[in-house]
Structures are given as C-alpha cells and as structure tokens.
Amino acid sequence: LVKGLENLKDKPAITTDNHKMSLVVNTGLMSDVVRSQDLGAEGVGLYRTEVPFMTFGRFPSEIEQAEIYRQQLSIFAPHPVTMRTLDIGGDKSLPYLPIVEDNPFLGWRGIRITLDHPEVFLVQLRAMLRASEGLNNLKIMLPMITSISELQTAKYLIHRSINELREDGLEIVEPEIGVMIEVPAAVYQAHHLAKECDFLSVGSNDLTQYILAVDRNNPRVAELYSSLHPAVLMSFKHIIDQAKLTNTPVSVCGEIAGDPVGAILLMGMGYQKLSMNAASLLKIKAVIRETSLTFAQQLVEKVMKVDDESIVQAIVKAELKRSG
Ligand code: PEP
Ligand code: MG
C-alpha cells in the first residue's frame, strides 16, 4: 500500500465540492486481484484476458477459462468486472499463435483476430458467460474496434453464445457490452458506437500511440509519446461529449487515468469513472479528495485552448501551485 494513504481505503473518491468519482482497477494476474481487494476498488474496469492465456502452452478450454473468470467475478461481486476479450497482436503474442508482420500495431490485433477465428472467440465468450451464472456482474468489452460492423458481428456472436448456454439449461443474464475507444476511427465514430452498445472505455495507451503515430514501446520516440498532447486531449474531450449525446457511460482505462494530472483533466472533461493499476488507486483517490470539480473544469477550459504539450504542462503546474 502507498505509505500514508491506507486510511483512504474505505473513503469515497469525492471532491471538495461533493462530486463523486468511481475508481476501479485494471487486472490480469491473480496477484492484481488480491492487491485490489485491499484497496476498496469498486470493481474492475479492465480485465486483460490475454494475461491468463499467456500462462498456457495452448488455447485454454472453455472450462479452464471459465474457472479463471469465475474467480475474478466472485471476488469482486457484486461489483462489476469488465472482461476484455482476447487482445493479442501488436506487442502481445501467444507462443501458440505466432504472428509475424512488418507493422504489428497496424496489423492483426485484438478483435480482428477473434473475428477471424470465431472458434476461439466463441469458446472465450461462452467461458465468460458460463462463469457469470448466478453472479451476474459480468461486462464484456471489445478491443481495437475500428468499424461498426465489427461491433455488430461481435454482438451477434455474444448473443449466439448466450442462446447456446441457455439451451444447455444455464441461467445467463445478458451482460452489458462495451467498446474500447483506442483507434482514431473509433473517436470519430464514438456517437455511432455509443448507440450500438452499453458503454465505452477509452484505451488511452493505444489511442495516444495511434493519434500521434508514436510506437508506445519504442524508447527512441518515447519523448514524443504523451497523452497530454493537445490533439490527444481533444480526442478525450470529443469522446465524452459524443457519449453524452446518448447518455452512454464512458470510462478511461489507459495509464492516463492513473496519472494525477490526467485524472484531474479527465474529471474536468466530465469522465466519472477511471480504471487504473492497483498501485495508483489510493494516490488518485487522495488527489480527487483534495481537488474540486470546478477547479478541474476551469483547468480543462484553459488547457484546451493551448497548442503545445509543454504549455499544457506549464499551465497545469502553475494552476496546481496556485491552488495549493
Ligand atoms: C489501452 O490501450 O489504453 C489499454 C488500456 O489497453 P492495453 O494497454 O492493454 O493495450
Ligand atoms: Mg489497448
């Protein structure tokens, strides 16, 4: 636990002007889950299911997956657990599904792979749904969505899985289905995507990479990679504004949500749910409890007018200092 912050565990993430934020965690390994339990997290905003897949030497079966998913769901119940469907490709590969490409981040990734391999996708979907029986706190989230048709096909396969399990006698409650907004095309189509699903979640790690055309893992261009670049901030603002048109809940699950400055700016834009690594949770809660929504909104207003990231940083620093 972060030193000195333990006493915040059971306190709400509420600003000095009484604005409540929802803080949830990103998980992958069981160790993340155990740590999150000590922190009073209100559920899981991103469970990276490719992490358990990496511990196998072959595709895990429906029953093997269901057992792992059931653990996540039962530990956090009744809080929701947002399970992201397999997101491999790019920098993440499975030894039993080697992918060799010139441009992996622009290639066969995330939903593209699972829609090309419905036999893998359907097993995973059935495992998630099977695991949720009786708990009913599952949400399903789709990575790397670039077109409405991908969402529609995925939804069709989810409903097919629900029907199959119901025919087998399982009592399956329909989960909420959400889309990750992590490619520029999805930003521009956020309104349409929001109409077709139950929630959106901003994957700021990939979105930053794709908006700036900067590899998120390449040290040579690491200086150019920043989620506070004005163009990236504009995309965050556009997404929340579009989601509001349909009253679709939208959260952020990339690293920016666990960054104090990022969290304040996101709150000022209107985001109410932030998902982060367990290690950041109490720090972000402390920051929110010391800030007001009004301050965050005024900061956003100032920051959205500037044209360079270094000025964004300078304004934030000066304003934080001024407000004490
Ligand atoms: C993201 O892209 O911001 C995200 C949360 O997913 P990942 O880091 O697993 O790609
Ligand atoms: Mg991503």
Image (spheres, rainbow, N blue to C red):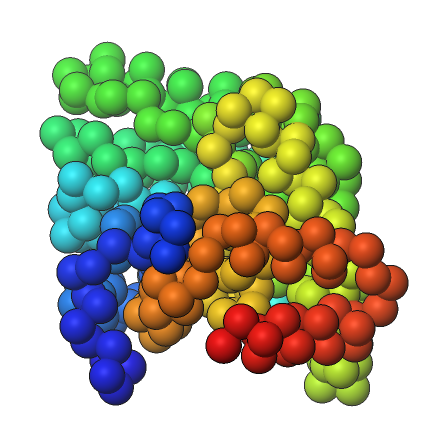
Q: Residue furthest right?
A: 307
Inspect this view and state whether residue 153 appears: no
Q: What residue is shown at x 44% (from left), y 62% (from top)?
A: 291
The image quarter containing residue 290 is bottom left
Query: In this rendering, is residue 108 above or below 216?
Result: above
Quadrant of the image occupied by residue 159: top left
Q: Position of residue 137 (x, y in %)?
A: 24, 36
Seen in the picture, residue 170 relative to 219 is either above or below; the reply is above
Q: Is residue 283 left or right of residue 267?
A: left
Q: Residue, x 32% and y 56% (percent of image)?
A: 13
**Residue drawn 47% across the image and 33% down it:** 249
Q: Tell me which residue sits at (58%, 29%) in the image.
A: 244
Between 250 and 210, which is closer to the camera in this rendering?
Answer: 250
Quadrant of residue 7 within the rendered picture: bottom left
Which of 228/109 is in front? 228
Q: Quadrant of the N terminus?
A: bottom left
Vertical position of residue 184 compared to residue 166: above or below: below
Where is residue 297 shown, x and y percent of the image?
A: 59, 51
- Where residue 299 appears, as percent x and y from the top left, is 64, 59
Q: Is residue 199 visible?
A: yes
- Residue 125 vertical placement versus 300 (above, below): above
64 horizontally vs 223: left or right: left
The image position of residue 237, as x and y in percent, is: 68, 45
